[in-house]
Amino acid sequence: MKLNLEKVKLTKPFSEYQEKIHRITDLIATKKGPGGDYLGWDRWPETYDKEEFQRIIDAASWIRQNVDVLVVVGIGGSYLGARAVIEALKGLYAQDSLEIIFLGQTFSPTYTQQVLNYLSNKRFAINVISKSGTTTETSIAFRLVKNLLEKQVGKTHAKQAIFATTDKEKGALRDLVNKEGYTSFVLPDDIGGRYSVLTAVGLLPIAAAGIDIAALMQGAKDAMNALTNFDVESNIAIQYAIVRHQLYQEKAVEMFVTYEPHMAMISEWLKQLFAESEGKESKGLLPGSVSFSTDLHSVGQFIQEGSPVLFETTLFVKKPLLDLNVPLETDDADGLNYLAGRPLSFVNEKAFLGTLQAHTGEGGVPVVQLEIDELNAYELGYLLYFFMKSVAYSGYLLGINPFNQPGVEVYKRNMFKLLGKKGY
């Protein structure tokens, strides 16, 4: 992975941040900064539980051999990371022996009922993910899908097909696991949901999808080792954080840009990571996302000529998962024969380069470029860790706690009161 900052004009050199970055690095290493008790992800690629890791692989193998569908029940960090990795590495229409469906991330009655209808004649397993076991969206969905599974195969057989990822010792879901005997995995106390993709939260669904989670973890570990130093001239996670901090002085929005539809959920994961980490105390960039070239025919107009409120962070993969050539037509009615025999990846790359020139040139939009040769499990593990490390630096540069999310609780309190929940 390469960080390219050629299309960004720095207001101050990296060297002027060295002393401050040194202090932040020490806060992260010693866990003495705000939210330091949620820094377990920082060394996780090295310290993760190897025994549980093997149990995850074994459970994923059982799922692939015994069911047609895995229903992942969770919201926020309990599903975004896994879905992002699976879609990025498998594509949107992968022909696979196991289908993965996500439930419990919405109150939508239509979506929920349609998923249940779809599962009514399928062999399926459930992976329910919740730290407390009382997250309302997740709990309702789990109750519904568990009842369906028990109705289809009986309670005894259903227990074999329910996998829970939750707190090690406490909470409603842990109590249910202890009572029913479900296979369970741990969401560590010192890792928040949006940083949990490399724990069992993400690894079980990812492994069930047939993705090499050992390669994913190796990529994250190599990123951890490469990004541990506090040298502003060599650490790309620090450089990205500094660039974002400088652009924040004049911009309000960071627009994440991808050029593959199957990478759209990577942008969704990034939106949660940055919005929940930085959006507090009336501070922070608003994270948005677009998928080009699709959105060049809609939002592209605003980016090119609208209010100068944003900068772009572009993720471009040079080698796609699949490729095909533009065919030759005898009559050339559409005028495309000048591209005949060219791979579609060639066209996509030229669209990227043309857009880059238009937005940074005539449009005057700063663009941070992240260039990836090939998107595989190793490279994606590296990328995920890179962003988590960057947001830690970025949050501390803003002077906020990047590991809490107090604002998320406000809507819950209001909703519980309106629903008539006891105590509200």
Image (cartoon, rainbow, N blue to C red):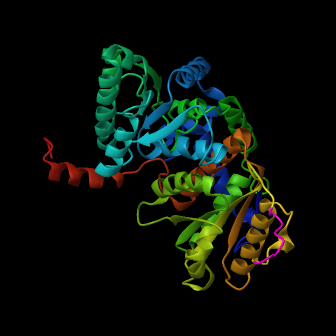
Specify whether 45 is left or right of 4.
left
Say if residue 396 shows up in the picture. no
Q: Nearer the viewer, residue 147 or 86?
A: 147
How many numbered badges does the structure rendering display?
Answer: 0
Residue 359 point in image, percent of width and height: 69, 78
In the image, residue 319 lies at what x, y percent? 79, 52
Q: Is residue 69 left or right of residue 345?
A: left
Report the side of 66 relative to 22 (left or right).
Answer: left
Q: Which residues are magenta?
A: 326-333
Image height of 232 relative to 385, above or below: below
Residue 264 lies, with reference to residue 95, above or below; the image says below
* For residue 383, above or below residue 131: below
Residue 224, percent from left and from top? 69, 40
Q: Main secondary structure of the magenta part?
A: loop
The x, y position of residue 406, in whole percent, is: 36, 51
Q: Is residue 277 visible?
A: yes
Residue 267 covered by magenta stretch = no
Viewer-nearest residue: 192 or 327:
327
Q: Residue furthest front?
A: 331
Specify the quadrant of the image occupied by residue 348: bottom right
Q: Nearer the viewer, residue 354 or 21?
A: 354
Residue 339 figure quarter: bottom right
Residue 137 placement, left or right of 94:
left
Q: Residue at x 81, y 59 (%)?
A: 325
Residue placed at 54% from the left, 40% from the top? 82
**Magenta region includes residue 327:** yes
Report the residue at 77% width, 61% height from top: 344
